[in-house]
Each structure stands twice: as structure tokens, then as C-alpha cells.
Image (cartoon, rainbow, N blue to C red):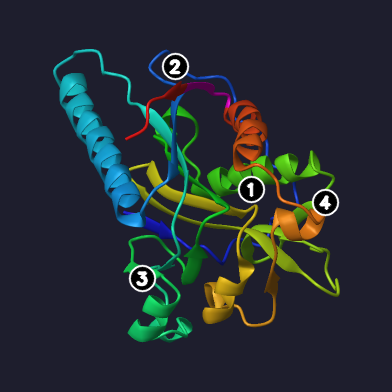
Amino acid sequence: MSLYSACVSPTDVGATPEPAAAPATTGQNRRVSVRRLGLVDYQPAWDAQEQLLAETLATKTLNRQRQEAGELPEPTANYLLLCEHPHVYTLGKSGKPEHLLLDEAGLTAHQATFHRINRGGDITYHGPGQLVGYPIFDLDNFFTDIHRYLRLLEEAVILTLAEYGVRAGRIAGLTGVWLDFEEGAANPRKICAMGVKCSRWVTMHGFALNVNTDLSYFGYIVPCGITDKAVTSLRQELGHAVPLAEVQDRLLPHLARLFGASLATESAL
């Protein structure tokens, strides 16, 4: 099992990542089942990820047995869950509890919940108006490079924001998508956070893009443990709300092209 931070990345973030090459073998399944869940509590969405991860890992175990018996393997599936959550704070495995600045009474007063979870990174916030994406991808179907995977997720968000006239990019040493991102810029601010878990090359958790997010909720945490940089949203940058479904529709083609995938929308949970 590997955990990858929602906050820290390699320093080679300036280069545009190469899209995934064509499948190397007929056994690679590049089909991604997209499930648009709408507004859903955090725990059911987490449970759904864990179930899909377990099913994929079970298939990989059976495939190893099939190959040892001289049989053909069964293709593993890939999923993308898209949703938004009620107000919730999540703390990664390497996070510091003191980076949540609310006690139980404060959480209740702000109608928020708190979860310790099994991704890398520190604390972050999810809430209404934020587009959250949970790819459960078997990277054996694409490429076995978790850092490239993160860079492609970032690139899909960067290209989506460009369609709204918002110039975004990366900051060396920090995962996620940022505005005013050049070295020495006066006001760097994060618009999309990322944090993943990878088990035997199967991913879970993912990205959180602030679209119409109530940014005041970030004031009750030290986001990703970073004290000197702000957060922003697409709404704040444009001066008006943007339909979340529209952002999803613009994001999906970029993900499909970058990962060399075909997308198929399925029913929700």
C-alpha cells in the first residue's frame, strides 16, 4: 500500500505530462465507468471507494492464479466517482489533528463532520459547491507511475480552468492546482487539492476542485498544513457561480484524452 500526500509533490512539476500511450496489451482495459453521485455524505462515498478497490484487488489476485494456471486474465475495471459533500473535514495519515481549529462544539455549530482517512497528506475541507473526483483506476491498465498519475489529474483540471479563462498551474514541491503560481508571485492560491492512496497500483481518493465552494470553511483549518498560501474558487475568480454539472462536462473529455480512456456514465450508488 502506498499513500501520497495531498500537499507535497516532486519538484519536477513544471513540465506538461505526456498523455497515456495506447494500451500495450489487449488485456489493458481503458474503459472508465463514470458515476455522478450528486450531493452525498462522506462516509457512503468512502465506503463505495473501498468496495470498488476491494473488488479490483480481488480480480487481480484471481488473475495471478489464472496466469499461473495458464489461463487468460480477466480485465480489471476502472471507475470515476464524481460528487460533492456536505461540510466535512478529512485528515490524512500524516496529518496533524491540531490543524483542525474547531472542537466538537464548533463542528456542530458549523454543521460539519470530521473523518480520519487512509490517504496521504494533512487536513482538507469538502463541502457543497466543490467538485470531488474519486478515480478508482487500475494503473496496470494505463501506466505504473503514481507521480505521472497525479500530474495528469492536475493537467485535466488546469485545462478545464483554461476553458473559463483562468490560468492555472503547479508550484514546485506542492501537489494540486494553483493560481498565481509562478515563482515569486504575490498571491499564490490553491483552487484544487489532491491526495490519493494506491494499493497494488489501484488508486482511490482523488481531487477536490473549488467551484462554488464556501471558502470560509477553510478558515477553520490549516489547509494541508500550509500557513502562507490562500485558497480560492472558480466562483471567486470569475465573480459568478458556475454550474457544477457544466464543470464536470468540461473536465471529463480532458481526463479521457490524457488517460487514453473511454468514458461511460453509469447509475449512481
Residue 16 visible to an observer of this rendering: no
Residue assigned mark 4? 167
Q: CA distance from mark 4 to mark 2?
A: 37 Å
Residue at (21, 20) in percent of width and height: 67
In the image, which disc is placed on residue 25?
A: 2
Question: Residues under labels 3 and 2: Cα distance?
Answer: 43 Å
Say which of 193 and 107 sits in front: 107
Q: Amino acid at mark 1?
A: Glu
**Residue 215 makes an appearance in the image:** yes
- Give the label on residue 154, or none: 1
102 vs 1, nearest the viewer: 102
Spot occupied by residue 159 in the image (x, y as percentages of width and height)? 74, 40
Nearer-N-terminus badge (3/1): 3
- The circle on residue 114 is 3
Q: Amino acid at mark 4?
A: Arg
Cα–Cα gap, marks 3 and 1: 26 Å
Which residue type does callout 3 highlight?
A: Phe
SS category of the residue bearing label 2: loop
User: Which mark lies nearer to you, 4 or 1?
Assistant: 4
